[in-house]
Every structure is written in structure tokens, then in C-alpha cells.
Image (cartoon, rainbow, N blue to C red):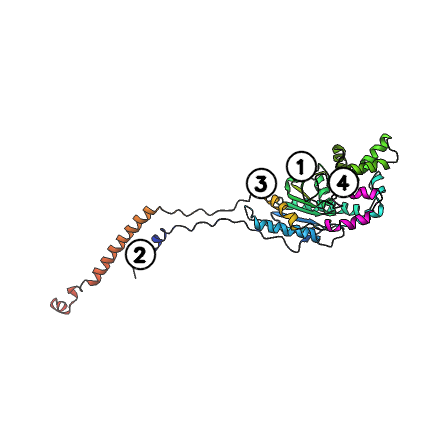
Amino acid sequence: MRLLPLFGCLLASLLLLVPPAPASARTASWDGLDDVPDPSSAPAGECADLLFVGARGSGEVTPWGDTVEQARTALDEAVRRSPTSRPLTARTVWLDFPASDPHTLAEVGLEELALAEEPPPTTYFDSVTVGEQRLQQLLDDSAARCPRERWILVGFSQGAEVVTAALSRRTDGWRVAGAVLAGSPATYPGQAVRRHGTAPESATGLVATLGYVRAQVQEARRSGADGEGVSTMVRSLIQVAVDQTDPTAMAAAAAGDDLDLPADVPVFSVCDSGDLVCDAGPALLRVSSGSTDFAEEFERTRPVHGGYGAEHFAPVFDAVLAELPPRLPPPEPVPTVPPVERPDAVAVVVATGALLLVLGAVGLTWWRRRRRPAPADDAPGRRGGAQ
């Protein structure tokens, strides 16, 4: 039994010869985006690497409508298709705002929208204001409570205008990992966006077009060139339709309406040709000529405006993910256990050989002792002779 400790030492020595298992490569993980997002009115979710915010379009049901859902799915698939360089966590929030129907614009009429000094009050514009305020509150909460969080913002139609207005006022655009504006009424030539879709570079959204026309009308009135402003309105609509707008005037009008975007923020605009909301010039020209009206144009453009799907969003999110690593903060240091120092192979072999020699010598001694005869002093005859 005395040999058991020695066998234990021998086994421990031999284990030193087994090289440590190579550390498995740290592959990227992705917990996906929740199917049931939290409302922005209760954004107290656990902080994550990414905050995904969806802002639905006009008249869509909560939480974020079909188009934002398409974008959410496309992002999920893009991450799984092209894993990120490190594990990521994400939380999802839907923007809780009215998203009022755009037909309230048609009720006002093109002339009043274009000729008034200030945009007339409509349910649509009131809804945008509420949405922008609530998105700002959500982003402020993230910046204060989760400073390491980065944002992916997706807005469709009215939701895209809300995202645009919010970003135009922020000074922490470095927190934005990507913003996607689908069918945006706030897009215009020269805006700091990367365009995707079939619409031309000159495509101008409905709200941006009205802002430009209104600014041109006001300038013509101030200069006395067009007291009524009607001819200037028609001329400005033609300029938008044929890509002859004044870039400086367009940029100034957009900035006045909070539609300008910081150049250092990765913003992607998805727009297809013929979409009244994001490519409004041709449709508005038809409306101004009396050949059609807003209601007819809204109905005509519905299939195009509601048709943004995975094929539109896949390349966008591939680009977002390609630029994501430098936008993420460095990973927090993880406490490490000091590595166990292992002797090199030669030292192990020498030590094991020496141990075997010692073990062999001890074993031989033990075996000889077991073979040795009992001492003669213990014999009965010798005990008697000594008396």
C-alpha cells in the first residue's frame, strides 16, 4: 500500500507530457433581435452592444409594421451570413408614436402646403414632431444609461422622416452604427445619405420637395418677383421633376426643416423609382397641372411604397456590418487566470526517468524485505538455551 502515493506521483508526471488543449477560436455569436420588441415608452431593458430602433410608417399598426419587420429580419440574416468579429448582444425597441395617416396632407391641398409661409398644421406633421421627441428621449436614455451601446435606427416612410429629424439635431452621431431610411419623404439631392434602390440620385421626397417649393415661393414674394407665388410654385415643382433645383437653396430649405444629416453618420436611403413619398417630383407635377390629385397619386404609388423587402435591405446591412467594428467600443477587459507553467518536454522526460528509477529501487528493496527469512533469535530452541 505504501506504493500508491508513488504511483500517484508518476501519473501526475506523465500528465505533464500531455499538451494543453488548444483554446477554441472565439467565434462571433448573435442572440438575434427579439420578435417582441419593447416600446420606447418603457426602454429600461438590459444594456447591449446594439440598440435596434424601428419607426413604422404612416397608418401602420404597432409595433413597427411590415417594412421595418423586413429590415429586422434582413439584419438578423446578415449577421448570421457574415459573422461579426466578436460576440454581440442586441435589444430591440419600437418607437411609440402616432404614425398618423398621410392623407391628412391631401386634405390640406398642394397649394396651401406650398404657398403658406409656414407648414399648415396637420395631423401628419404633429405626428412627426411627437415621434422625433420620443426618439430623442430614447436615444438620450441609451446614451446616459448604456454609454457603450451603439444604435441601428430603421424608419419607414413617416418613421424615416422622424429618424432624419432626430439625427439632424444630435451631436453624438458617432453612436450610430447605421441608420436606414426606407421610402423617406425627407430625402433630397445632396443629402448625406447612401442611396439604394431604383430611384435616381435626383429623387426628392414629398416633404423635402414641399419645403424647397415653399422656400422658393417665399423668396420670390420677398423680392417682389412673384407676389402670389403660384408661378414660382409651378416652376419649382418642374425643377424638382427634371433635376434642375438650386443645390444651395435645396440645402438651406432642408436645414430649416431639420432634414439635413451629419456627413459622418452612416445613413442609407432606400427608394424605388415611382414612389410618391421618396421620389415625389413627377407626381407633384401631375397634381399641380390638375391631371390628377393627391388621393390618386397615393393610391398609384402604394404597391411601390409598400414593396421594400429583403432584397432592398440585404446589401444595406452588409455595408453596415462591414463598417461596424471600428464603431464599437473596445471590449471590456476580462479577468484572466495566470497560465499554468509547464516544464518543457526534455525536463519532463528526465524527471519522469528519475522518478521511475527511484520507484524501481524502492520496489526492489520492498521485494527483498519480503523475501528475507525470519531472524534466528526468534526460534524456540534459542530462547530455552539462553536460560
Q: Name the dominant secondary structure of the magenta segment.
A: helix
Q: Residues within 10 Å of mark 3 (few under 14, many from 20)?
A: few
The x, y position of residue 82, in whole percent, is 56, 48
Lower position in the chain sequence, tag 2 or tag 3: 2
Q: CA distance from mark 4 to mark 1?
A: 18 Å
What residue is disc 3 on?
326
Q: Residue at x 13, y 69 (%)?
A: 381
Q: Circle 4 — which element?
A: helix
Reading the image, the residue beneath label 1 is 263
Cβ atoms at labels 2 and 3 below 8 Å apart: no
Q: Say few, some or many: other residues with alpha carbon within 10 Å of mark 1 (under 14 / 14 to 19 / 20 or more).
A: few
Q: Amino acid at mark 3?
A: Pro
* Farthest left residue in view: 385
- Is 140 included in the stretch rendered in magenta? no
Q: Nearer the viewer, residue 136 or 260?
A: 260
**Inter-mark Cα distance, 3 to 4:** 32 Å
Locate residue 8, reporting x and y percent. Answer: 34, 57
Q: Is residue 387 above or below residue 27?
A: below
Residue to which mark 4 is pinned: 208
Tag 2, which secondary structure? helix
Is-magenta flag for residue 296?
yes
Q: Tell me the CA gap for discs 3 and 1.
A: 17 Å
Mark 3 element type? helix
Tell me the CA gap for discs 2 and 4.
86 Å
Residue stretch rendered in magenta on the structure: 277-304
The answer to whether the residue labelled 3 contacts the one labelled 4, judged by CB atoms less than 8 Å apart, is no
> Which residue is pictured at 25% across the width and 58% down the height?
363
Where residue 164 appears, as percent x and y from the top left, is 71, 42
User: Sequence order check: which comes first, mark 3 or mark 4?
Assistant: 4
Frontmost of labels 3 and 1 is 1
Mark earlier in primary sequence (2, 4): 2
